[in-house]
Structure formats: structure tokens, C-alpha cells
Amino acid sequence: MKFFNFHLMPYRHADLDAIEKHGTAWVTYSNRDYDPLKGAELYHEYLDQMEFADRLGFDGVCLNEHHQTAYGMMPTPGVLAGALARSIKRAKIAILGRAIPLLNNPLMVAEEYAMLDNLTRGRFIAGLVRGIGAEYHAMGINPTFSQERFAEAHDLIVRAWTEPGPFQYVGKHYHFNYVNTWPRPYQSPHPPIWIPSQGSISTIRWAAQMRYTYAQTLAPIAVVAKFFQLYRDEAEKAGYQASPDQLAWSNTIYVAETDAQAVREAKPHMEALANRLLKMSPEMLLPPGYSNIDSIKRIRAAKVTGKPQTCEDLIRAGVIMMGSPNTVREKLAEYQDLAGFNTSLTKTQFGTLPDDMARANMVAVAEEILPHFRNRLPQGVRQAAAE
Amino acid sequence: MVDHTATRLSVRGCNIALMRGGAGRPLLFLHGGNDAGIWIPALADLAARRDVLAPVHPGFGASDTPDWLDTVADLASFYLDVLDQLDLSNVDLVGCDLGGWIAAELAVRNTRRLSSLTLVGAAGIHVKGVAQLDPFLRTDAENIRDLFHDPTRSRELWQHLSHKEMEDVVLKNQTTTAKLTWQPRGYNPHLYKWLHRVDVPTLLIWGADDRLYPKDYAAAYQRLIPGAKTAIIADCGHLPHVEQPRAFVAALQEFLDAKRAAA
């Protein structure tokens, strides 16, 4: 299994009581709560952690994009990838991903990603996402055009990387007389494209058809297994067998000496993430048209939003893994076999977890978990069509 | 009170639902984001003296969602096609909320088939510094309450829209409303430049307590449309035709009668 260290870069000094009172840490939660002196320190603390992950032997580091929120301080992840491109010498750098429908000029992502690919001499992974519903409130982009804009922006970016320029591009949302991206990407034909998603069926189908690595965001392992099976089924329909490397699961690991100690230490920090930094209303998460009507009805019926979750709930559901090295190894092996993935996108810092604890956790994961999975592949994964 | 017939109308391949009732001069009523497909008492009253046509916009209710539907301007052009196809003339055009925006866009393009224009709590322009609610960050229940001056008056509409059988229609209407109004939020930044072209008598009916497009919007429209008159309805929110149907019909009839007398 490959391990990527995934950082959300939360503003971990946020006033959790104020967020609770306001109802969300997103879009309408005032940036008056952001203290630049503390924030600047956090940027360096987190970048130091990612450099540390490289030295500890993680295969890669991951950044992502969210806007107008204490949940994460990476509205422009390319800035941080640029900062890491010269200090991280070995590991891959993945942005998972840029929310391309939010942009009125997606060529800027073609350029930015091509620069990062050159700067890292081909160690760059290009994630493309639609962005969650809240971004459409924050950035003033019409959510009903999200899917159209994603499809068009993706096509434009891939063509900009692969077709000799200049050429003209005429779409519905994007129009360019001259597409002629300098620099061209370092990797040929272009950096690997990864598609993170909350589990949209159409996205999974499309990623499988395109042979893009599918990255499942925060979800219980049983649901992850279902989505990954769908990906394998769709790959088969497209005429090939998906490799477990094409399936990446975004999780959280916290390792301590005992299970009880792990939960005791991690609990307040994990719950700050789950119940404060992540919290938003259904209206903010799912604006009209962001998903099709059937998906919206399905999500509404599942009533996934709003319920407070304890650290123990999240462990039980297999959203996160916390415990002694042995417990975490057992769970991860069980989940790998259940869902059939070979890439773990692991958060070692989460919520309000301070630097010393995050670093101790990173060391524990690197020493106690990584070596045991280095050559491990998923065992006995169902390859037949999902029922 | 005159009842209506529910019919279908196909215009250049787009099939829509059309409620039609009464007889007399044609009155085309363009609904807003929340009141599609309901033959409200105000329409039944108006139908006593007029041929009232209340279509359901493309993208709403039982009407088709055509591939070409992206903007309010598309709907304005579509309704010009509707007027041509039905060969209607001397039309009194009435539009509420989103329907008011469509009506205004239609009127700046072509008033050849119009006799008058009435905007009711209309979207379409932006007035700086006026506080407005953001319907996209409020719950369905809050959104319905926000439409009314008297929250108890919202119950009937809420019961209608929150009915399980209405879920698909409500989601469809919300999706199309978002498509047409999300960004810029409820206006076309270029519309105000051309409202001077409206050359038919114009009335602005507004609820005194409209929290979505407060009555400053009536004043702004009045400044922009030559000779426009304003009727502010007391104890009334965003939907005068629903919350104060008698005052609404009285204001509209008075305007239409006076216009006719002058002509």
C-alpha cells in the first residue's frame, strides 16, 4: 500500500464555541476570528509537518482547496505546493484537488499544475474536483452549472496539456482564441489525474472510464467498499481490470500505546473537526442543482448531516482508525481487504490536534504501520459485479 | 371567480403547462419562483373580465426543461415566441418575482404585442445598500415564511409545497430558480440600462413589507421606466397576489381601466 499524508490545514485556533453558536465554520462565519499572527505560524507548522512526512517515508503529501472557512486554510493550494516543491525531495505532491468549476479561467489551473509538474520534475499529482456545495455560496458560482463546467474545464485542461498549441477552444462556458500553455507538463502525456469525490455515482463511473485514480473522501468503510466495487464494475464495462492503485481512501489514523489512550488523546481534536469545523446546513452543503434531483432525495433520505458524532462513532463506522499499533494494523488490513484499495490518504493531523501530538502520531504511523503494509496488496477482493 | 382549463402548449418543441380561464382582453400572468401552477383566487377574479393565461415556465412544474434554458433572457425570448404563436395582441403582461424579471426583459426587447406591463415584487435589477434575504441559505420552511407579512398566511402555501407528492416539483422549481437567479443574485446587471425602452403604461405593485425585494425596488423601477406608477399594498409581503388578493386585483383593475379610458 502507498501512504500519502493528507493535510486539511485547519485553523486550529478557531473559537469553537463561536462556531457552535453560529452553526457553521463556513462562508458566513466571520474571518474576524482569524488572527494572522497565529495563522502565519500555523502555515509553517503544517508545511514543516509535510516536509517531516517526506523524511519519514510517506509516499506523498496531499493538499486541497476550500474557501472562506476555518476548516482549512488552503483557498489556493498551489501556493503551498510551490513552497513544498523544493523542500520535499522525494515524496510526490498531490493537490486533491482544485475546484475547477469555480474558475472563470480554467487555463490558469493548466498553467499552475504544469508549473508544479516541472518544479517537482514529475512528482506532481493533479486532482480535479467540483468543490463542495459551500464553495458555490462562497465564490458566487452557479451550482446548477457545476457539472457542465467541470466537464468542460477538465477537457480544456487536458487538451491544453496534450495538444500542441496554439488552438482555439469554444465551449459553452469557456471560450479561448489561443490555448497555448507554457510550460507544458513535465510528465507525459500529463501528470496523473486523481478524482476525489464524496461518492457521486456519475463521477465514479466517469473516473473509471477515464482510468483516473478515484479518491473517496470521508466515509464509513462499508460505503467506501461499495463505491470501490462500483468503480471496478465500471472499469470492467469499459473493458479493463482496475488496479487497486486506482483506488484511494481518505482516512485518519491516530496511534498511541493502547486503544484507550489513543481515543482519550485524539477525541477532543477529532470531535472538533467532525462537529465544529465540518458542520454546515443542508442548504449550504447541497445548493439546488449541485446534484441531480434523485441524488438530493437520496442524500436527504439518508439524513447524513447534522447529527453530532463522537470519536467512538467514527471508529466504529470505520471512518477513522485509532488505537494501539496492533489495533490500527488489524483494522487497516481488514479495510484494505474489504474495499480493495492500495492507496491510503491519511490525515495524521486533524481538527485541533497540536503540533507535538501530530508529530508523535506521524512517527508512530511511519514506524508501526507503514512498514507492515509496504508490500501488502488487498486480499480476496470481490471482482465480480456488485449486487 | 372564474375557473380555468389546464392545457398544454408546444412552442418550437418546448411543451409547457398552461392554465387559461375567462374571456376578454388577454392577460398573461408570469409566476415567480414559488407559485408555479396554482390557479390562485386573484387569477380567478381577474378572469371574470379577462382572458387570463397563466403558463408554467419552462423548467418548472409540469413543463419541459429545454436544453436551451440557461438565463432569464432565454425565457423572455421564449415568451415572445409564445405571444407570436398564440397571435395575441393588446396583452396586459403581469409578472411576479422571477416572472416580473422575465416580463421586464421581454418588454425592453419588444412591446409590439403588449398593452401594458405590471411588475409585482419583481427581481431583475439591483438596488445598492438594500438588505435582502438570501433564500439559498434558508430552509424551505423559512423561505415560505419570508414571503409573507403575516406568517399565518404562509400556512396554506407551505402545506401545498411541503406535501410529499410535491417534492419532485419543488426540487425542479428550486433548481431552475437557482439556474436563473444564483449569480448575479436575482438581477441582470445590464437590464437597468434599457428599461427606458418600455413604452407601454407600467404599474409596479409591491408589498409594503417585501423582504426579498423591498419596496425600494419599486422606487428604482419607477425611476427607470418612464411614467411608471406604483401601488404599495399595506400589510403585505413579497406576494401581493397571494397575501392580499383583493387589494392586488383592485390596484391592477384600476390601472388597467384608467389606461383604457386614456386610450
Image (cartoon, coloured by chain):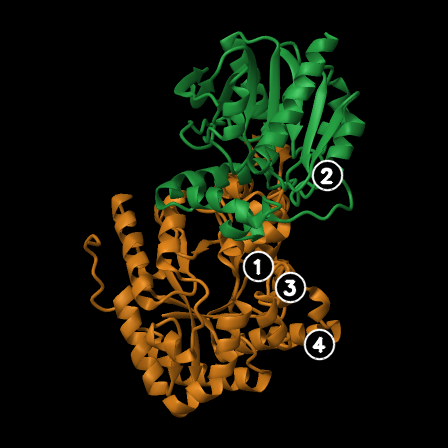
Chain colours: A orange, B green
Q: Give the mark toward the camera: 4 or 3.
A: 3
Q: Give the mark toward the camera: 3 or 1.
A: 3
Marks 1,2: beta carbons within 8 A: no
Of helix, strand and loop, which one carries label 3? loop
Q: Are marks 3 and 1 on the same chain?
A: yes
Q: Are marks 2 and 4 on the same chain?
A: no
- Which residue is disc 4 drawn over? A38
* Mark 3 vs mark 1, CA separation in Å: 18 Å
Q: Amino acid at mark 4?
A: Lys
Q: Earlier in the sequence, mark 4 or mark 3?
A: 3
Please say whether residue B67 is visible from this viewpoint.
yes
Q: Amino acid at mark 1?
A: Glu
- Which residue is disc 1 drawn over? A65
Dividing the image into 4 quarters, which one contains the C terminus of chain A? bottom left
Q: Position of residue A78 (x, y in %)?
A: 62, 58
Marks 3,1: beta carbons within 8 A: no
Residue A118 relative to residue B168: left or right: right
Subunit bearing disc 4: A
